[in-house]
């Protein structure tokens, strides 16, 4: 599932997380991006890997942005599940930095595993040392990856890498690969402390 | 010539077809007329044509006015015109009155050839499939091989879907708005009540009321009043009328609430201009349409030969053609790995929302249509 495309030649602001996701998605495969925003990731995957991509997006403004950039986009609320999608009908289902904002966390992961042969989940690591410092200082963390105040945050289920590892184990989800990055660089030493963004490539056991 | 980007003054045309059309029912129409209008210019490659399919009470007069003093333009004028979402600078737009209609195409109220009398009850029941076949005849007549897009709302959306099934090679894009892959029992029940209102009107005369120089006005009026209730949402009626009274309560059955005044006005207006036999046939076409029927109820299988790209749009407050029904279409398209986008527009106005110029809704259509590409190389 690797690819030989030179992603640095493309006209995108380089995003390490996109590059890692591209490395986990097969050339020409069928991809579903949940909470796809303005379609940036799908556009990137389409242009670099010729994927057949569909996005799911609830917000009108983002939905229209997807339409404008030529992304197939289905308007629906992920909290309602993925009943519009058949079992195992996608090679990869992606939930990029949206897990923490989901109310029905277990349900969406189970739905992703139902619809996708593999799934990719990425989330901000609440165990990152900068978050821990702010907590130690007696405040809820506010940072580039968690840019909200406690009272206006859409994030309702923040977790650490250790928490998510345990979640996978308890839910019989096998981790094919896990990468952790901070400011675009991969972190292998003490990832739950030094890693800002956690990225998981998963499949059902 | 334009005010507010209007297409301006338009005129209907009639195409006569002398080759027989075999209908889904098995009946044969030996000949028929279709009345239509076009807006914009067909390009040299003849690949910029867009067909507009009308709903229950629509017709070929989709945009523009017949004269400068016309009070109202065509029924989808807010969508179609120079620089409007469906831009007539780019597209050649065709609107027609469906077979069985009452606005000039062959239908129950038109004169049956050689008889000098209206068809009346003898006009056959036509289906969505028959309409699409007759529309294909019209395209052929206009020298157009394929459509760059077919657009329809409600019953028109069913025709747009049917186009992609019947002629997969001849339609590039289908815009299916406020539609459904078939009607639910509840939806058909409304149609049945409407038909019963007409059929039990003493002036109906088994459909041959023309000979008696009368029309089943009361039945048609009630049918339309019922329809109007279902096209609006509870919230929209609440906002428009609420419990507002015309005057003080009079303890009578006259018009006392504003809502009654509206329904009676709409019913009377419709009964004065629409043909009851056409209404019966349009509602039956709605009931009968069910492309999955021959595929064990599996819509995905019914769409297995489809090639078009799709935009499906529904409206949150539409309970006659609810978002759930549009999602069934979307699922079947996804199952076939077709190119599809689906918008669920937040709207107050119920089913009627598809005819309204909501900014977000029109932005969706504008952007989708702007992205459609075709080369004018012959």
Image (cartoon, grey):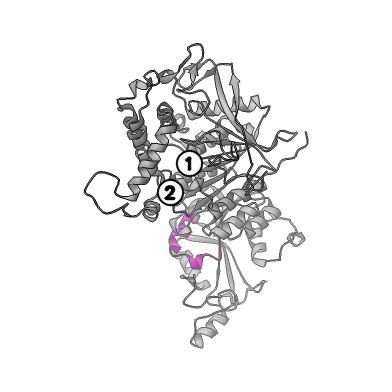
Q: Mark 1 falls within which chain? A: B
Distance of label 1 from label 2 (alpha carbons): 12 Å
Q: Mark 2 falls within which chain? A: B
Q: From the viewer's perspective, is B254 left or right of B231?
A: left
- Return the residue nearer the eye: B8 or B346: B8
Check residue A122 for magenta coloring. no
Q: Quick one: label 1, few (<14), some, or many (20+) residues within 10 Å?
A: many
Residue at the limit of the structure toward the front, as seen here: B69
- The answer to whether tags 1 and 2 share a subunit is yes
> Residue at the spot x=53%, y=30% of the render?
B97
* Residue A36, horizontal then vertical, whole percent: 57, 59
Q: Secondary structure at mark 2?
A: helix
* Residue B270, horizontal then vertical, whole percent: 42, 36
Looking at the rendering, the stretch of residues picked out in magenta corresponds to: A96-111
Residue A86 appears in the figure:
no
Q: Nearer the viewer, mark 1 or mark 2?
A: 2
- Return the residue nearer the eye: B126 or B166: B126
Check residue A99 for magenta coloring. yes
Q: Secondary structure at mark 1?
A: loop
On screen, residue B266 above or below A22: above
Query: What main secondary structure does the magenta stretch of the protein show?
Result: helix
* Residue B369, horizontal then vertical, whole percent: 63, 46
Q: From the viewer's perspective, is B155 left or right of B188?
A: right
Q: From the viewer's perspective, is B337 left or right of B183?
A: right
Give residue A177's mark: none
Would you name the residue on which mark 2 appears? B350
In the picture, the quarter occupied by the C terminus of chain B is top right
Q: Quick one: label 2, few (<14), some, or many (20+) residues within 10 Å?
A: many
Q: Quadrant of residue B338?
A: top right
Give residue B179's mark: 1
């Amino acid at each position: 599932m690797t690819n030989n495309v030179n992603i640095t030649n493309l006209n995108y602001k380089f995003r390490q997380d996109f590059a890692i996701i591209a490395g986990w998605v097969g050339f020409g495969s069928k991809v579903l991006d949940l909470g796809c925003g303005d379609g940036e990731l799908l556009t990137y995957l389409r242009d670099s890997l010729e994927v057949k991509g569909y996005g799911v997006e609830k917000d009108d403004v983002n939905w229209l942005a997807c339409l404008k950039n030529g992304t197939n986009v289905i308007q629906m609320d992920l909290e309602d599940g993925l009943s519009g999608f058949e079992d195992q009908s996608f090679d990869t289902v992606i939930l990029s930095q949206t897990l923490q904002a989901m109310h029905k966390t277990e349900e969406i992961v189970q739905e992703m595993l139902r619809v996708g042969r593999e799934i990719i989940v990425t989330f901000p690591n609440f165990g990152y040392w900068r978050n821990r410092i702010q907590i130690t200082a007696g405040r809820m963390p506010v940072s580039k990856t968690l840019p909200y105040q406690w009272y206006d945050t859409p994030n309702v289920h923040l977790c650490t890498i250790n928490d998510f590892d345990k979640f996978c184990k308890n839910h019989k989800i096998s981790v094919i690969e896990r990468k952790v990055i901070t400011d675009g660089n991969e972190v292998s030493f003490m990832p739950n402390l030094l890693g800002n963004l956690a990225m998981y490539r998963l499949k059902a056991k | 010539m334009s005010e507010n980007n209007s297409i301006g003054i338009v005129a209907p045309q009639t195409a006569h077809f002398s080759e027989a059309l075999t209908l889904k029912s098995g009946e044969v129409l030996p000949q028929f007329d279709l009345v239509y209008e076009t807006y914009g210019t067909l390009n040299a490659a003849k690949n910029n044509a867009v067909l507009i399919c009308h709903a229950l009470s629509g017709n070929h007069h989709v945009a523009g006015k017949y004269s400068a003093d016309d009070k109202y333009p065509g029924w989808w004028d807010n969508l179609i015109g120079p620089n409007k979402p469906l831009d007539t600078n780019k597209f050649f737009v065709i609107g027609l009155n469906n077979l069985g209609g009452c606005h000039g195409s062959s239908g129950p109220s038109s004169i049956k050839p050689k008889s000098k009398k209206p068809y009346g009850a003898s006009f056959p029941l036509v289906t969505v499939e028959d309409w699409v076949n007759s529309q294909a005849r019209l395209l052929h007549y206009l020298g157009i091989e394929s459509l760059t897009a077919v657009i329809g709302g409600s019953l028109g959306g069913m025709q747009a879907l049917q186009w992609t099934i019947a002629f997969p090679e001849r339609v590039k894009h289908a815009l299916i708005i406020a539609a459904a892959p078939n009607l639910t029992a509840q939806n058909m029940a409304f149609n049945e009540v409407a038909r019963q209102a007409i059929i039990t009107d003493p002036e109906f005369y088994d459909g041959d009321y023309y000979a008696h120089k009368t029309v089943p006005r009361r039945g048609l009026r009630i049918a339309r009043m019922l329809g109007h209730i279902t096209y609006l949402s509870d919230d929209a009626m609440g906002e428009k009328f609420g419990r507002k009274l015309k005057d003080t309560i009079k303890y009578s059955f006259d018009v006392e609430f504003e809502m009654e005044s509206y329904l009676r006005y709409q019913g009377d207006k419709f009964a004065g201009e629409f043909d009851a036999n056409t209404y019966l046939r349009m509602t039956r076409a709605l009931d009968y349409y069910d492309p999955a029927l021959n595929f064990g109820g599996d819509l995905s299988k019914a769409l297995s030969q489809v090639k078009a790209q799709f935009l499906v749009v529904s409206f949150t407050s539409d309970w006659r053609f609810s978002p759930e029904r549009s999602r069934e279409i979307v699922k079947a398209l996804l199952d076939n790995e077709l190119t599809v986008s689906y918008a669920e527009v937040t709207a107050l106005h119920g089913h009627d929302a598809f005819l309204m110029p909501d900014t977000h809704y029109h932005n969706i259509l504008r952007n989708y249509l702007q992205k459609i590409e075709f080369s004018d190389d012959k």
